[in-house]
Image (cartoon, rainbow, N blue to C red):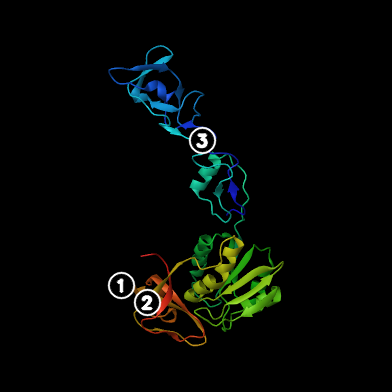
Amino acid sequence: MLTEPIRAAGPIPASDRATLDGFAVQASASLGASAYNPVRLPLIAVAAGDALPAGTDAVVPFELSEPDGQPFIEIVEAVAAGDNVEQQGAVATIGAILAPAGMRLAARHIGLLTNAGVSDITVVRRPRVRLLVAKPTRDGAWADSNGPMICAAVERDGGIIGESVAVERNQMALQAALLEPSADVALVLGGTGPGRDDHSAAALGEAGELAIHGVAMLPGETTGLGRIGRKIPVVLLPSPPAACLWSYELFAGRAIRRLGGRGADLPYRSREIIAARKIVSSLGMTEICPVRCGTGDTVEPLPSFTETGLMAAVSAAGFVIVPQGSEGYPQGARVTVYLYEER
């Protein structure tokens, strides 16, 4: 992402240039040319992208001309000035902004900047994220589903996974892992709740600073926030997958997006839509409520994340965030819906 705008140092193109392979001519000299009256002109071959030679202002395609064996061509159709020519400054005038600050460069931008002769740019470095996945202490097989989910979200938000490691879910192991050389952001997945083997908060408190443990949010109420080392932010994400996801979206994701020069807003489009049925929420908790599209421009609530876990996100068109001071929205209310995809 660019930290400053890039402007054209000169007009682009710097001079009139051919848009196709052919012969450069003075258009006025081609007047009257036809199959029955071919006009003889100097042979000046050009390729697409070549600057027009002095004294020429148009390009005749190969198929409308024929060399006559001498340093001349015969053309059978007249051309006008500017035919098959890209005029000087047609792409950009001197000083024009080619890419604004904050732009995330795609292939098309790189092509334009290279064409403009820009070789050095200043960008915001993508933040490196370290994942510590707290392994349950219970016996039996364990499969990490949160790690791949959060890795995908980090990549979406412009971050880079510097390291992802599984750590025994005990205070000493977690504390030692937090004290190892870190990245720009550290995320601890699991171990944040009231269970006997949930030691992430205590480990962070010993390794650095535990600023917050527990938030008024459903799902994700056992989220923790703090820092280690030289003000490296740490987010403790709960183990339940739905809680892990929303803890990431509303806390960790915002930090990663900001460090990467992006806005802190949620990475979803939002629209005002009418609630077809009442959306119920718990008073005193900010709640993420899944919704699906109804008839017309309406949405209706789905079973909560507490009831169906991540299936509530997979089967939903989007979600509504109900603030903690509200018990929800009545039928017919206009609500802000964050859409996973525009449908």
Q: Earlier in the sequence, mark 1 or mark 2?
A: 2
The mark lying in front, picked from 3 and 1, is 3
- Amino acid carrying label 1: it is Gly
**Spot occupied by residue 310 in the image (x, y as percentages of width and height):** 43, 73
Numbered mark located on residue 296 in the image: 1
On the image, the x and y values in percent for residue 247 come to 53, 74
Q: Considering only order in the chain, which callout, 1 or 3, is on the residue closer to the N terminus? A: 3
* Residue 310 is at least partly visible in this image: no
- Of the pair 6 and 156, the residue shown nearer to us: 6
Taking the spot 64% from the left edge, 72% from the top edge, the residue there is 174
SS of the residue under disc 2: strand
- Picture coordinates of residue 150, whole percent (x, y): 52, 66
CA distance for labels 3 and 1: 51 Å
Report helix, strand or loop for mark 1: loop
Between 309 and 29, which is closer to the camera in this rendering? 29
Q: Quadrant of the C terminus?
A: bottom left
Q: Which residue is mark 2?
A: 274
Q: Residues within 10 Å of mark 2 (few under 14, many from 20)?
A: many
Q: CA distance from mark 3 to mark 2?
A: 52 Å
Q: Which residue is mark 3?
A: 88
The image quarter containing residue 320 is bottom left
Mark 3: which amino acid? Gln
Residue under the image location 58 percent in, 83 percent down: 196
Left or right: 307, with 228 as reference point:
left
Any part of residue 41 in sight:
yes
Q: Label 1 to label 2, Cα distance in Å?
A: 9 Å
Between disc 3 and disc 2, the foreground one is: 3
Q: In the displayed structure, does residue 90 sit left or right of residue 297?
A: right
Question: Which residue is at a point 48% across and 74% down the rendered structure image?
Answer: 241
Residue sitting nearer the eye, 82 or 53 = 82
